[in-house]
Image (tube, rainbow, N blue to C red):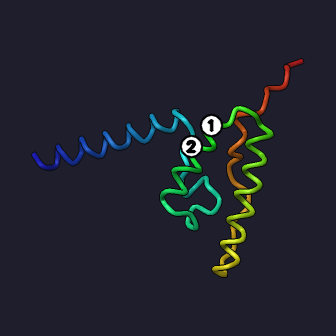
Amino acid sequence: MQTKFITALVIGLLLIGSSSARGPWRASESNTRGWQLMSPEERIEHQAKIRSFTKLEDCRSYQVSHHQLMEERAQQRGLAMAGGGHDICDHLKTEKPKP
């Protein structure tokens, strides 16, 4: 009985995880530069801010300032920041017309 419950719970969690991947962008440790340097409140604000952008230029401006802030925090703590990763403004790029 308990094994069935645990199995159902695991399956449910996997389904929730896969469906949320198709939903709105979610900030996480794997896609947010400086995640470990942010408070839980800052993480929520960051995610809401990214979701609110409608213009690529505004998103880029925020992205640059966020990265600078995270770099400063990392230097203060003697940490190295990982580069690269997901482009948080990618969803705002206009599609290029197909020839």
Q: Position of residue 32 (x, y in %)?
A: 61, 55
Label 2: few (<14), some or many (≥20) within 10 Å? some
Q: Above or below — where is 32 with respect to 1?
A: below
Q: Which residue is mark 1?
A: 52
Image coords of residue 87 (percent x, y): 71, 46
Query: Which secondary structure lies at badge 1?
Result: helix
Q: Is residue 19 above or below residue 31?
A: above
Q: Amino acid at mark 2?
A: Ala
Please, which residue is most extreme toward the right here? 99
* Disc 2 to disc 1: CB gap under 8 Å: yes
Q: Position of residue 5 (x, y in %)?
A: 17, 44
User: Disc 2 on helix, strand or loop?
Assistant: helix
Specify the quadrant that holds the N terminus: top left
In the rendered image, which quarter is residue 56 located in?
A: top right
Q: Amino acid at mark 1?
A: Ser
Q: Quick check: 10 above or below 94?
A: below
- In the rendered image, the quadrant that contains the C terminus is top right
Name the residue beneath numbered marker 2: 48
